[in-house]
Amino acid sequence: MRELRRRPLDPPPRVQVTSNSGRGLGLSSWQRWPRGKGAALGSALSVAAGQPAGGNLESPPRRGLLPSASPAPPAPSKDCQAIMKVLLLKDPKEDDCGQDPYVRELGLYGLEATLIPVLSFEFLSLPSLSEKLSHPEGYGGLIFTSPRAVEAVERCLQKDTKAEVWKKSLKEKWNAKSVYVVGNATASLVNRVGLHTEGETCGNAEKLAEYICSREPSALPLLFPCGTLKREILPKMLKDKGIPLESVTVYQTIPHPGIQGNLTSYYTQQGVPASITFFSPSGLTHSLKHIQELSGDSIGQIKFVAIGPTTAQALAAQGLPVSCTAESPTPRALAAGIRTTLQPHAC
């Protein structure tokens, strides 16, 4: 790749992103970064989640832009192919660097990532969950298989009295027990509320269930905050091994109200992406029809990617070729998989 000369930043154009109702979701802008020697060519347009129609969210999600605040690190190869655009169907999540970690990792390989949320969530039964969290003596530990379940716990702790009791005694009592999680992203959220985790490298619920079954069983049930679309494989595997489990449904998944409008805006401005990554079977269900309509005859040129085996199975069930499944549900694994799929001969 030839060396790029440093040049002043151009003022970013403003792009109006609209929902399927025709109302603006907020002004978004392309982030243009300095392009010095070895600089990555990635940038991202992040469309934040809007409030679902109806529902009982205790506080509405933030609207508008979730900007990428820092430039992508240098790309690892001088001979990468021309920049390619990839679409990630997930909520933008800023890390400590002020940037979505998936966008940053893809930028390392000169891939320009765009995030579009396709799901919204409504929280349920929070008073019941709060009561159960107040009695750690009745449980052998906790299980978290999704970030939303951890967010439900955070919402329970937002009340001043509960937060104080949690810091003084409840957190320590729960830390004396096992806290099992799937994935590093969920683990980091659990760590944020002060709990120590194990099992995060398992990658999916089935492997986590195997890990739990390999531990010394507790006579007390494990508390499992979960969503309405949870798979039954983990509860079944624990039941078969005689490990008691108490599930409490704390959120339900609904389509994001801006799916159609945001996808239409993306295709209008950027064209057909080189790759699309799905992060859940439900995300696939709610977005596939729009993607098929917008892609038309060009859909065959898109490389479809899954964050894990369950989503890959859902893609295959829809008759879509799965070009890549991430080895683990992490930004680094996904970025490496997409790079290999799109640039198989790159250094």
Image (cartoon, rainbow, N blue to C red):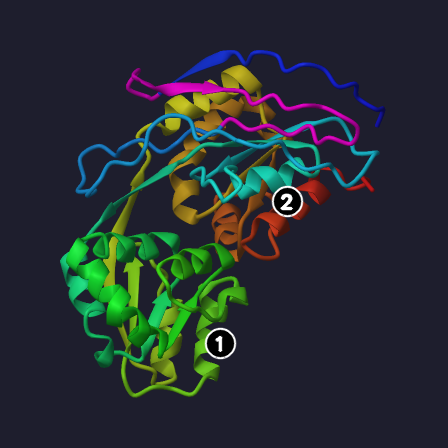
Q: Amino acid at mark 2?
A: Ala
> In the depicted view, which residue is nearer to us: 116 or 26?
26
Does the magenta-highlighted stretch encompass residue 42? yes
In this picture, is 70 found above or below 325? above
Q: Position of residue 246 (x, y in %)?
A: 25, 73
> In the depicted view, which residue is nearer to us: 106 or 135?
135
Q: Amino acid at mark 1?
A: Tyr
Q: Position of residue 128 (x, y in %)?
A: 15, 62
In the visual, does 253 lie left or right of 56? right
Q: Position of residue 275 (x, y in %)?
A: 60, 34
Magenta segment main secondary structure: loop
Q: Quadrant of residue 243?
A: bottom left
In this picture, is 103 found above or below 145? above
Q: Which mark is residue 78?
A: none
| Number of other residues with Cα within 10 Å of mark 1, as a class: few under 14, some 14 to 19, many 20 or more | some
Residue bounds of the magenta highlight? 19-45
In the visual, does 344 lie left or right of 151? right
Label 2 belongs to which residue?
Answer: 335
Does the magenta-highlighted stretch encompass residue 274? no
Is residue 325 shown to the viewer in this render?
A: no
In the visual, does 116 lie left or right of 166? right
In this picture, is 127 found above or below 40? below
Q: Residue at x 57, y 29 (%)?
A: 299
Report helix, strand or loop for mark 1.
helix
Label 1 belongs to which residue?
Answer: 211
Report helix, strand or loop for mark 2.
helix
